[in-house]
Amino acid sequence: MTTQLFNVGQTFGVKAPAGLVIEGFSATDHPLIPPATPYVFRQGLAALIAFLRDPAGDAFLLTGPTGSGKTSLVCQVAARLNWPVQSVTCHGRLELSDLVGQFVLIDGSTRFVHGPLAVALREGHLLLLNEIDLMDPAELAGLNDVIEGQPLVIAQNGGEVIRPHPKFRVFATGNSAGAGDTTGLYQGVLRQNLAFLDRFRVLPVGYLEPEVELGVLAGAVPSLPPEVGEKLIAVANEVRRLFVGEGESTAQLTITLSTRTLVRWARLALTFRGAPQPIRFALEQALTARADPDQREAIHRVAADVMGDLWTGSSAA
C-alpha cells in the first residue's frame, strides 16, 4: 500500500503547527478502513499520533470507563489516515492461536488461515484488542516479542516467519489499566502480567467535556434543541459522578450514561415527542429499564431535578 502524508491540523480539525504531518495510506478502498463519522478529537490525539509516528517497541493502551470513547478514538484516527484496522474483542476463552491463525476445512481440504495478528503484522495494519483485560494474561504474554518488533514464527504452519511491516501497530482498550477491577463494576476483568503491561504506553480516556459533548449531540441529533441537549448532558454528568463515586451522595451507581447512551436517549426523546413524558420514557428505553429499582429511582430523581418541566412535559422540543 502506498503511503501518504496528512497535515495533522487539517485532517483532524485541531490546532497544530502548520508543518506537522503524519504518514498514513493513500488508498481509501480497503475494506478494513473504519468508516469516518463526525468526531471531535481531544487532547489524547497528540499521544496517539506520536505513537503512530514511532512506537519505539511499545504498544498503546487506552483505559477508562465504559462508553468514554476509547475504541472510537483509535478508529476515527485510522479512518482519516486510511489505515486498516484488525479489530478483536477479547474474552476469557480467546487464545493466542485465535489471533495467529488456524487450520480450517475449505472446499474439502485443510488450509491454514492467518488470524488478525498475522495479517496486521504482515500488511501493516493496526491491531486493536478491545477489552484486553478480559483475556487470559498467560495468552497475552505471547505478544511480548511481536510488540517489540520481533518476527512472528507460526510453528503450526511449518515454521512460517512473518516479519513486522513498518506500519504495524498494536492498540488495546480496557476498563482497567491492567491491575484488575477494584470497583466490582466490570465482571470478568483480570489482573494482567506486569511484564506484558510494561510494554504499553497508557492513555486515560474520560468522558467528554460538556461543550464538546453538546457538539456531538448536535451532530448526531441535529433537530434536538440546544437547551434540551444541555440538560441531557447535565443529567449524564451527574450520573457519571455517581457511577465513579464522586457525587455528593454516598450511593454509587453500577450503570452509567455514556456518550453513546446519551445520543440514544436524545434520539428516542424526539421519536416519542408528543407522548406523555417522552424524556422519561426515552431514558427508560435507553438506560434505566436495565437498572435495579433503587438505582432507576435515583437516576430518575436526578433527571427530574435537572430537567424541571421537561421531565413531566409532553414534548422534547
Image (cartoon, rainbow, N blue to C red):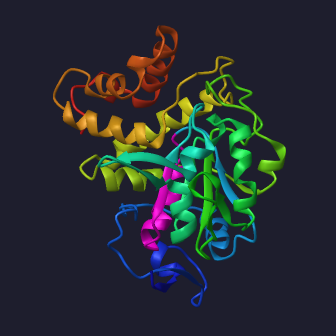
Residue projecting furthest to the bottom: 19
If the image is split into quadrants, where does the C terminus sit? top left
Residue at (53% x, 59% y) in the render: 74
* Of 198 and 101, the residue lying toward us: 101
Frontmost residue, 243 versus 299: 243
> Could you say where residue 192 lies in the image, as x and y percent from the top left?
75, 39
In the picture, measured across the screen, residue 53 lies left or right of residue 39, that is right
Find residue 165 and report its horizontal and vertical position in percent.
59, 74
* Magenta stretch, residue numbers: 67-87
Q: In the figure, residue 309 lies in which quadrant?
A: top left
Residue displayed at 53% across by 25% down = 255
Q: Is residue 174 above or below residue 295?
A: below
210 relative to 286 in the view: left or right: right
Q: Is 144 located above or below residue 293 in the figure?
A: below
Report if residue 239 lies within the magenta region: no
User: Is residue 151 placed above or below 306 in the rendered structure?
Assistant: below
Q: Is residue 264 above or below residue 282?
A: below
Q: Observer-nearest residue: 159 or 97?
A: 159
Q: In which quarter of the image is the N terminus?
A: bottom left
Residue 137 in picture, x, y percent from top left = 72, 38
Res. 59 visible in picture:
yes
Q: Is residue 211 visible?
A: no
Q: Which of 47 and 26 is in front in this view?
A: 26
Q: Furthest-left residue in view?
A: 274
Q: Position of residue 44 (x, y in %)?
A: 63, 61
**Side (left or right) of 206 relative to 104:** right
> Is 76 inside the magenta-drawn segment?
yes
